[in-house]
Every structure is written in C-alpha cells, then in structure tokens.
C-alpha cells in the first residue's frame, strides 16, 4: 500500500519521482483508509536519500502508512526540510502517538555517545518512545546508542571498519519468530560502521534476544521480549549503489581505503551484487505487519 502524503508538500513530487508508491490525504479519506502513523528520526547526513530508502520499504507493505519525519531541534528551531510539512520538530511531535518509529544514525568516529552534540535531546526522544511509540526500530549507530541508553550495553571500536555485505544466520531456538518470517536461514546485509557491540553483552540481558548473527559483524538483529524494540546493526535499507558511492567518496580522501567486502562483482568495481533486497523487503513488511500493526496499536490503545 502507498505512503500517505498530502499533495501540497514538496515531498509528493520527490517521492513519485523516487519510485515510492504514494497517495494524497484526500484520496486516503475517500477510500476510508486509516494509515499507520510512522515517525522517522534520521540522524544521518544523507537526509533525503536515507528517508526515501526507508519509505520505499514501507510502501511495499499491504498496510497504508503516513510518515512524519521528526527533526532534532537545534538553536530553538527545526532544521530546513526538503519535504516541507512532512518534518516536525520533536517539540511539535512529542504530544502525538505513533504506531511505529524508525531511528537511524551514522557518526564517523568512535566518540562516546554523550559526545554527540544532540545526545541530550536524543535521550529525551528514546525515553519518549516508551509512552508514545508502539514499536521502535533502531538502525546502526542509533541501535548502538539505544542499546546503551536502555540496557547499558557499550560499543567497542573496531581495528578495521566493518564495511561491506556479509552473510548472516538466523538464530533458531525452536520458536516461531514473526519478524524473520520468510527470510532464509542464511541472508546478507550491508554494514558500514567503526564499532561493534559484543554478543555476550546482549545475551546477558534477559529482555533481549539475538535473531541474526554473523562471524564478521556479530549480533546484527536483536529484539526485546515484547518486540516493541528492534535493533538492526546493519543497513537493510541501502539501495544498490549506496556502498559504491560511499567508497568513491572515501577514496577521494584516502587512496588506500579498502573497497567494501563481498559487494563488487568485477575487477573494475562498477557492478555490484545487490543480494539483500528480498530479505530487506520481507523484514520491513514483517515489522509493519507483526510489530507495528498487531503489537504497537494494542499498546497505544491500552495507554490512551
């Protein structure tokens, strides 16, 4: 089903041009379509591209979705938005209830979490998700930061950057796991980070469960006991050429930078093997259908 976006927002044209399925708010009303309310907090420098990647995955679900992009407030006002009215400052959004929320972020160094200039506001948002968000999905740096905030799990610097497309195995414990339904026992996922969390630290927390693991990347998909918090340490949302463009950017700054592992298919490094797209689509559909629609909506109904 499509993303619900009002026509007056500049995002409407951006998304249709970006091959994201959209309908306007009036059409949704005529169809008596009540969309799931999903918030996105994007802490990456690639604002537009990252948000379109997530919206493509969300628009592949049979459930209609309305997106609100929450922007951190700096200097007392919301940053400029490429999407007009889709953006709200946290101050504008904090009284609203969301069925689901995606939080993603990327910092280029291994500085302590509290060294991030937005850390205090980010802590406030994480705490706010407990009461105002049905199910939250944290990606990459945001997942590490949320694991630290909620469970005091520390990140650890890597000698070499975890960079490429790596094979993962589902962790089977004999129980059905709706989040991983339809995904093969072995699947791939892109990664791009300078730090890691240790699987043993996750396993020491009773409220957490590892759903997928890789020898190179460690615990890569984690959830809590009621599935309201999901942590993905990689980047299922990446499109075909995200890592290629990141590599070309880094190459300009450092001629010795290594190419992403298991990604390029030829010696000229101009073609890539996008091996993760089907598992990414399934994962995000499962998150919407199982976590957000079935669990998150019930949680918010009880708290309303």
Image (cartoon, grey):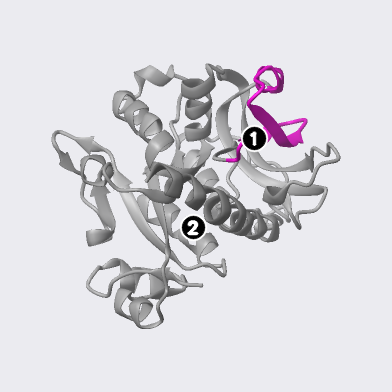
Whole-percent x, y for residue 88 in the image: 25, 50
Whole-percent x, y for residue 242 in the image: 53, 52
Please give the name of the residue rendered at 22% of the width and 73% of the height, measured from the top-left corner.
8
Q: Tag 1, which secondary structure?
A: strand
Image height check: is 232 above or below 215?
A: below
Quarter of the image where one finds residue 191? top right
Label 2 to label 1: alpha-carbon separation: 21 Å
Please give the name of the residue rendered at 44% of the width and 42% of the height, measured from the top-left corner.
103
Image height check: is 224 above or below 303?
A: above
Q: Residues within 10 Å of mark 1 (few under 14, many from 20)?
A: many
Q: In the shown orientation, is residue 88 left or right of residue 139?
A: left
In the picture of the structure, the residue carrying the numbered disc 1 is 222
In the picture of the structure, the residue carrying the numbered disc 2 is 53
Q: Is residue 102 visible?
A: no
Quarter of the image where one finds residue 5? bottom left
Q: Residues within 10 Å of mark 2 (few under 14, many from 20)?
A: some
Q: Nearer the viewer, mark 2 or mark 1?
A: 1
Whole-percent x, y for residue 119 in the image: 34, 25
Q: Nearer the viewer, residue 164 or 35?
A: 35
């Amino acid at each position: 089903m499509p993303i619900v976006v009002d026509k007056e927002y500049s995002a409407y044209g951006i998304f249709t041009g970006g091959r994201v399925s959209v309908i306007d708010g009036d059409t949704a009303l005529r169809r008596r379509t009540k969309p799931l309310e999903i918030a996105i907090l994007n802490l990456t420098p690639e604002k537009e591209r990252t948000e379109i990647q997530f919206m493509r995955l969300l628009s592949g679900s049979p459930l209609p979705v309305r997106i609100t992009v929450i922007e951190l407030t700096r200097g007392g006002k919301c940053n400029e938005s490429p999407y007009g009215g889709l953006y709200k400052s946290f101050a504008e959004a904090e009284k609203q209830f969301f069925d689901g929320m995606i939080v993603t972020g990327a910092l280029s160094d291994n500085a302590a979490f509290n060294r991030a200039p937005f850390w205090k506001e980010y802590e406030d948002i994480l705490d706010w998700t407990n009461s105002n968000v049905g199910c939250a999905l944290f990606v990459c740096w945001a997942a590490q930061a949320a694991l630290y905030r909620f469970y005091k799990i520390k990140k650890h610097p890597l000698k070499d950057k975890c960079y490429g497309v790596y094979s993962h195995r589902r962790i089977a414990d004999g129980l059905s796991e709706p989040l991983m339904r339809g995904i093969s026992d072995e699947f791939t996922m892109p990664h791009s980070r300078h730090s890691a969390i240790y699987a043993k630290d996750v396993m020491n927390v009773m409220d957490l469960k590892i759903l997928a693991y890789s020898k190179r990347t460690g615990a890569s998909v984690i959830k809590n006991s009621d599935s309201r918090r999901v942590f993905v340490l990689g980047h299922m949302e990446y499109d075909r050429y995200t890592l290629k463009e990141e590599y070309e950017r880094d190459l300009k700054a450092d001629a010795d930078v290594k190419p992403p592992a298991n990604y390029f298919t030829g010696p000229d490094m101009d073609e890539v093997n996008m091996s993760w797209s089907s598992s990414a689509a399934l994962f995000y559909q499962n998150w919407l259908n199982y976590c957000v629609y079935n669990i998150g909506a019930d949680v918010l109904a009880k708290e309303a």
